[in-house]
Image (cartoon, rainbow, N blue to C red):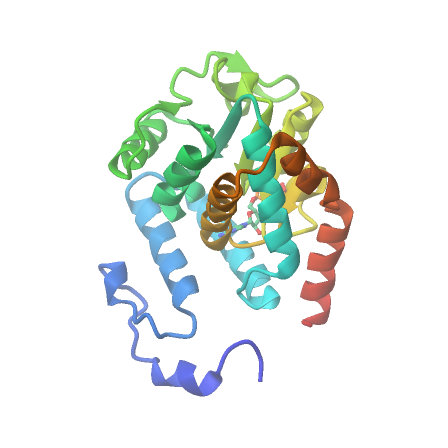
Amino acid sequence: MTAFDLATVSEHETVPAEVEDEEEIPTDHPRYTDLVTRHRIERGVEKGITHLQGMHAEGRGSAFDYLLGEETTPTADEAERAAAAQLLLAEKPVLSINGNVAALVPAEMVALADAVDADLEVNLFNRTPERIDAIVSHLREHGATDVKGIEADARIPNLEHERAKVDAEGIYAADVVLVPLEDGDRAEALEAMGKTEIVIDLNPLSRSPQVADVPIVDNIVRAVPNITAHAEALEGDGASDADLEAIVDAFDREAALEDAEARIRSGL
Ligand code: ATP
């Protein structure tokens, strides 16, 4: 049997392709997470939060997730713990939010920002004032108080105008940035600025995880709550800076990328 029980899938063939509310998706459906994810992206597009291209990105991610078995692998869990340690060690951590991230995990990003004392910054590939406003409002509806990225008064060097815009007091000044589902050009430009980058991306061959200090090959809907849980556990255990540094040092980024690729290619 593959990761999914086909007999169970056929029992749920009556689930409509279009649902008004994600509550209508049966929680026991074997593809529940994937259906919820698709629904959130569709709603994101309708609300002007997510760009239409975000749907293609989601489709690519969904295919990789299927091949990974739609679960957090032990290596991804290690990466998520290293990410938590790295964020707790940071002087100025910033969590970057694009249209897919806002649609998929708004409350979870707010919770992570609270857990590691980080700023949230809206950072868009297809930047328009309307989309920035829609995302900021959406994050506020999910508990965010201070959201950066509106002023965009600084530039990432070596990127064209709109994609380079960031807040001088946000991503520009950050030492550690979490950039989920990031475009490869910007991930490379942030790396060239000397940032410590944590990337969440289901494709281990994509340029963003390839340049990341901590590449997390996992679905963002599982990864972000798990980073928060690790951060809270480390804090609860009273981890010292030396303990956190040991976790970061023990993490092997090459091995993590190789393990994810091997799992996708072999299906094991
Ligand atoms: P490059 O990084 O080389 O520019 P790309 O053009 O494929 O690669 P983008 O479209 O900019 O990348 O970013 C989308 C990335 O996000 C894809 O690699 C996709 O697999 C990943 N992705 C999409 N949905 C999710 C998700 N829910 N969780 C994690 N990763 C996801």
- Between residue 91 and residue 261, name the one nearer to us: 91
Residue at position x 38%, y 51% in the image: 41
In the picture, the quarter occupied by the N terminus is bottom right
In this rendering, the answer to whether 214 lies above or below 159 is: below
Q: Hey, which quadrant is residue 213 in on the image?
A: top right
Residue at position x 59%, y 21% in the image: 160
In this rendering, the answer to whether 61 lies above or below 34 is: above
Residue 57 place in picture, x, y as percent? 51, 49
Residue 125 place in picture, x, y as percent? 50, 32
In this rendering, the answer to whether 93 lies above or below 208 is: above
Residue 205 place in picture, x, y as percent? 70, 50
Residue 187 visible in rendering: yes
In this rendering, the answer to whether 110 lies above or below 77 is: above
Q: Hey, which quadrant is residue 138 in on the image?
A: top left
- Between residue 268 and residue 54, name the one nearer to us: 268
Residue at position x 39%, y 44% in the image: 108
Residue at position x 55%, y 66% in the image: 66
Residue reaching furthest to the front: 238
Residue 87 place in picture, x, y as percent? 55, 33
